[in-house]
Amino acid sequence: MSRKSVFFVGSMTNQITGSKLPSRGNVLSVLFYNMREVMLTLHESASLVIDESLIFWKKARIPTQDRSDCIKKCKKLYEALRNLEKHKSRKNDLVDKRKINLKKPQYRSLKWYMPSVGTKIKA
């Protein structure tokens, strides 16, 4: 696999484009670009990606979590992908389940909105 291509993500891009909310793939693509091409650390790259993607969420007027929580979530997503990449050659049920979970539609967009939004209040 070439250095420009990332396992499970595809090609790297330098910024998030489009008019829709960024997906996990968009975020990971820019994260890897910042880490491999611009040579930033994981924290710096995650910070830039979060700043970039929060712009889309603010344009949609969706309340978001705190920036530091979003950075933690982005790092956790990166670690999950790295763990999956380490075991990509294994033919194992657990690895297959993790791949399927990353591809599910409900997991495609990142959930950086406030947890209290959309929850029902018990009367």
Image: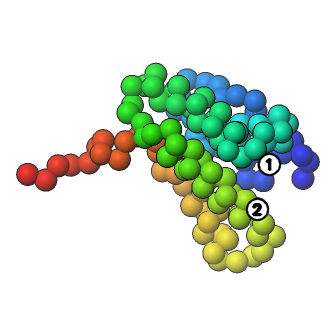
Residue type of the residue flagged with mark 2: Glu
Residue closest to the eye, 35 or 18? 35
Q: Is residue 83 above or below residue 123?
A: below
Return the x and y of residue 96 as percentages of the image width and height.
66, 69
| Label 2: element kind | helix
Residue 105 seen from this side: no
Residue to which mark 1 is pinned: 6
| Label 1: element kind | strand
Residue 40 appears in which quarter of the rendering? Answer: top right
Residue at figure coordinates x 76%, y 62% from the top left: 85
Residue at figure coordinates x 43%, y 40% from the top left: 65
Image check: 74 left or right of 36? left
Q: Report the residue that reaches farthest toward the bottom.
A: 92
- Numbered circle sitting on residue 85: 2
Residue at figure coordinates x 71%, y 64% from the top left: 84
Q: Is residue 114 above or below residue 80?
A: above
Image check: 23 left or right of 88? left
Residue 91 appears in which quarter of the rendering? Answer: bottom right
